[in-house]
Image (spheres, rainbow, N blue to C red):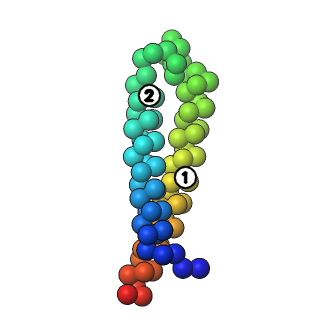
Amino acid sequence: MKLSRPVSWFLLAFGVWSWVIWATFVKNLIKDSSGLAFDDGHPTAYFWVHLVLAVVSFVLGTVVGVIGLRGVRALRRTS
C-alpha cells in the first residue's frame, strides 16, 4: 500500500504533535500542586490513570509517526 504525500506528512506531524503534547502534560502532571495527582506525596488514582493514558499515547504517536516517516521516505525514493 502506498500513502500519498499529504497523508504521510499528516501522520508524521501527528506523531510529533502527540509527543509534544503528552510530554508537556506529563511534566505538568509530575509538578502538580493542586492535590489531584499527589496526596501527601503519594500518587493518586488520577495520577496513575493519566500516566497510563500518556504512555499509550506515546506508543501510538510513535507508531503513527513511524508509518508517516516511512511513507515520506518511500515517496522520496520514487521521486
Outermost residue, top direction? 40
Taking the image as drawn, is residue 69 in sight?
A: no
- Dot 2 lies on which element? helix
**Which residue appears at 59% of the width and 30% of the height?**
48
* Lower position in the chain sequence, tag 1 or tag 2: 2
**Which residue appears at 38% of the width and 81% of the height?**
76
Q: Quadrant of residue 51?
A: top right
The vertical placement of 5 against 23, above or below, is below
**Front in this rendered view, residue 79 or 63:** 79
Taking the image as drawn, is residue 48 in sight?
A: yes
**Which residue appears at 40% of the width and 33% of the height?**
27
Q: Which amino acid does label 2 sit on?
A: Ile
- Dot 1 lies on which element? helix
**Label 1 close to label 2 by CB (< 8 Å):** no
Residue 25 has which mark? Answer: none
Q: How crowded is mark 2: few (under 14 residues within 10 Å), some or many (20 or more)?
A: few
Residue 59 has which mark? Answer: 1
- Image quarter where the N terminus lies is bottom right
Q: Name the residue under label 2.
A: 30
Q: Which amino acid does label 1 sit on?
A: Val
Residue 17 in picture, x, y percent from top left: 42, 51
Q: Distance between the residues labelled 1 and 2?
A: 19 Å
**Which residue appears at 45% of the width and 35% of the height?**
26
- Image quarter where the C terminus lies is bottom left
Q: How many labels sit on residues?
A: 2
Outermost residue, bottom direction? 78
Residue 73 in picture, x, y percent from top left: 41, 77
Q: Quadrant of residue 24?
A: top left
